[in-house]
Amino acid sequence: MYAIGDGIKKNIPESIYWAKKAVAQGETDYCKKIAYFYFTGDGVKQSKEEAAKWYLVGAEAGDPGAQIMYAWMLFNGDGIKVDKEKAADWYWEALVDPLVKTIIHRV
């Protein structure tokens, strides 16, 4: 709600606060949202390092979108040290997801 201003004033820092609380309780779906805000600097000070941290949390929880973004950051050294071997591992991990396989096969 705070992230898009749905019925209330848009407030990204407040959105991040509540998303972090949700992650702490096991709702790892919010990791990508937190990472996105830090990656883009939308409503908070941009920090690629902080974005990488949250993408990694989501990646380790099995989120294929987070795995792909973390792999991309590793491959390009965007906010973190380049590690193409780890990037390949995370890309491969994302391919295990049936939805990702479906999307790739349709391209």
Image (cartoon, rainbow, N blue to C red):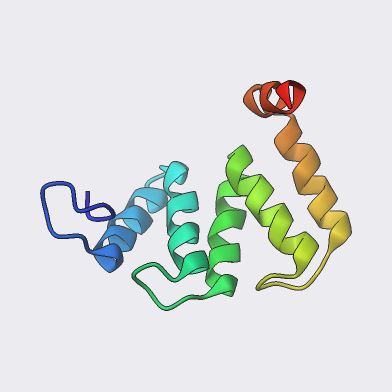
Q: How many marks?
A: 0
On the question of residue 22 being in view, the answer is yes
Does residue 44 sit above or below 10 in this rendering?
below
Residue 12 x/y as whole percent: 29, 64
On the question of residue 62 being in view, the answer is no
Residue at x 49% of width, y 51% of height: 32
Is 95 situated left or right of 59 in this image? right
Residue 76 x/y as whole percent: 77, 65
Q: Nearer the viewer, residue 57 or 71?
A: 71
In this view, which residue lies farthest toward the front? 107
Residue at x 22% of width, y 55% of height: 2
Q: Nearer the viewer, residue 54 or 8?
A: 8
Residue 82 x/y as whole percent: 81, 69
Is 16 situated left or right of 75 in this image? left
Check the picture and name the quadrant holding the C terminus.
Answer: top right
Does residue 107 sit above or below 64 in this rendering?
above
Image quadrant in which you'd find residue 34: bottom left
Residue at x 67% of width, y 26% of height: 103
In this view, which residue lies farthest toward the left? 7
Does residue 101 sit above or below 59 in this rendering?
above
In this view, which residue lies farthest toward the right? 85
Is 79 situated left or right of 16 in this image? right
Does residue 94 sit above or below 41 in this rendering?
above
Residue at x 57% of width, y 53% of height: 57
